[in-house]
Amino acid sequence: MFYESNDLIIRPYRTGDEPSLAFYSNNRLIAAQMQSWFPSPFTYDDALVWVADNLQSNSNFPIIYYGDVIGNVGLRNISGDSAEIVVWLGPDFWKKGIGTRACQWMADFAKAELKISRLSAAIKSGNIAAERIANALGVRIER
């Protein structure tokens, strides 16, 4: 159960995803919206580690837009039937509905495949876009 449309694909990580993941994720605007676990700068070495750690993962997936890995959607702090949903995209792709589509897929995947019924999101104050996505999905916001 993965996602594919004419412009967007969400599937498991593969070796080779690292260059575009590093390119689009290494941005101070993304880092400013993320929690402290997100590396800044997000280097090619960070991308190598991220992809290697998630090759067999069922909790983090690349967001692929017209062939480029532009971000990630996933789950953190999975415990029983609860998890934190996480998404990031390169700023060039903000305000296009991509984050909303990715998070909706992740919420559906978490429920159907992982039996997770309670999702939360750790969102920094002022991240209005993330708050809108969380509210649309009925996800509990944590600060």
Image: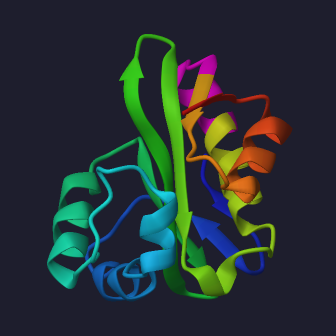
Q: Position of residue 32 (x, y in %)?
A: 47, 65
Residue at the image point whose x is 60% and y is 81% from the top:
91
User: Which range is magenta?
Assistant: 108-118
Left or right: where 42 falls relative to 66: left
Q: Position of residue 3 (x, y in %)?
A: 66, 58
Q: Position of residue 9 (x, y in %)?
A: 62, 69
Could you say which is closer to the camera, residue 1 or residue 133? 133
Magenta: main secondary structure: helix
Q: Does residue 112 appear anywhere in the picture?
A: no
Find out whether residue 86 is within the magenta segment.
no
Residue at the image point whose x is 55% and y is 18% from the top:
115
Residue at the image point whose x is 70% and y is 30% from the top:
139
Left or right: where 10 falls relative to 18: right
Q: Quarter of the image containing the C terminus?
A: top right
Q: Is residue 66 above or below residue 103?
A: below
The quarter holding residue 134 reads top right
Could you say which is closer to the camera, residue 22 or residue 64? 22
Residue at the image point whose x is 61% and y is 44% from the top:
106
Left or right: where 113 falls relative to 136: left
- Residue reaching furthest to the top: 80
Q: Is residue 81 above or below residue 72?
A: above
The quarter holding residue 92 reads bottom right
Q: Is residue 141 above or below residue 54?
A: above
Q: Position of residue 68 (x, y in %)?
A: 51, 86
